[in-house]
Image: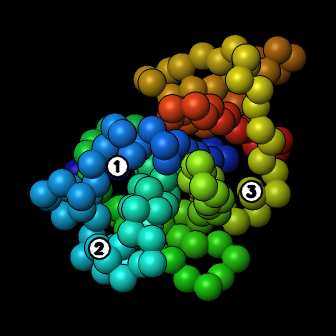
Amino acid sequence: CKIKRIELFMIGNDIVDLVQARFQSNWKRKGFVQKIFTQKEQELIFSSKNPENMVWNLWTRKESAYKIFNRKTQIRAFIPHLIECNLGNEEFDTVTIEKQIYYTQTVINEESIYTIAVSNKKYFSEIVPLSNDVCFEKENGIPFLTDSVTNKKNPISITHHGRYWKGIILKI
C-alpha cells in the first residue's frame, strides 16, 4: 500500500474533560486498555501513580498525532496499536506512527488533559490559539481557514470534549 504524503505545516490537538470522561468512559472495562494501548503504554498506565490520568494523557497524545498523520496521508483508520507514545524526560515527548515521529506537549490539570502535536519541534513556537467563534471550512473532514488575501488554505486543528473547545493554527 503506497501512502500519499502531503507536505504541509502539521499540527494536531486533543482535549479530554476529565469530569466528563469519568461519567462517559469506563477505561477500566474489560479489554479497553488492551485494545487502545501498546504493551509499553499499558506498562506506563499500570505503573503510574494516577492510572486514569495516564490513560487520558496517552489518549490525547495519540489523537493529536493521528490528526497530523490523517492530514498527511488522507488515511482514516482505527489504528491505536500502530500509534505509540514515548514519554521521556525531555522537553518534548514523541508519538510514532509508521516510523514517523511527532512531537507532543501536554498540559494536565484537575479538570482536563490537553495535548498539542507537531510534525517539527520548531512549530511549537509558532502555534496561535483560535477563538471558539472562528468560521472554518472542512475538506474531507479536515478543518482549515482560507486566507482572504491569498486564498490559501491554512491547516488548523480543532478539538472539543465536555466543557472544553480548543482550536490552533500555525502563524507561519
Q: Amino acid at mark 3?
A: Tyr
In the picture of the structure, the residue carrying the numbered disc 1 is 3
The quadrant of the rendering that contains the C terminus is: top right
On residue 123, which mark appears?
3
* 17 relative to 101, above or below: above
Q: Give the residue type at disc 2.
A: Gln
Q: CA distance from mark 2 to mark 3?
A: 29 Å
Q: Is residue 135 left or right of residue 3?
A: right
Disc 2 element: helix
Q: Residue sitting at 51 percent across and 32 percent down?
A: 162
Residue 135 visible from this viewpoint: yes
Asked whether 99 or 106 is in front, the reply is 106
Task: Please name the residue shown 29% across and 73% down the image.
Answer: 42
Instruction: Find the residue positioned furthest to the right.
Output: 149
| Percent of width and height locating residue 3 | 34, 49
Q: Which residue is mark 2?
A: 42
- Ranked by sequence position, the earlier of labels 2 and 3 is 2
Label 3's element?
helix
Mark 2 or mark 1: whose residue is earlier in sequence: 1
Q: Give left or right: position of 45 versus 171.
A: left
Instruction: Please state which amino acid type lies under the numbered disc 1.
Output: Ile
> Residue, x 31% and y 43% (percent of image)?
25
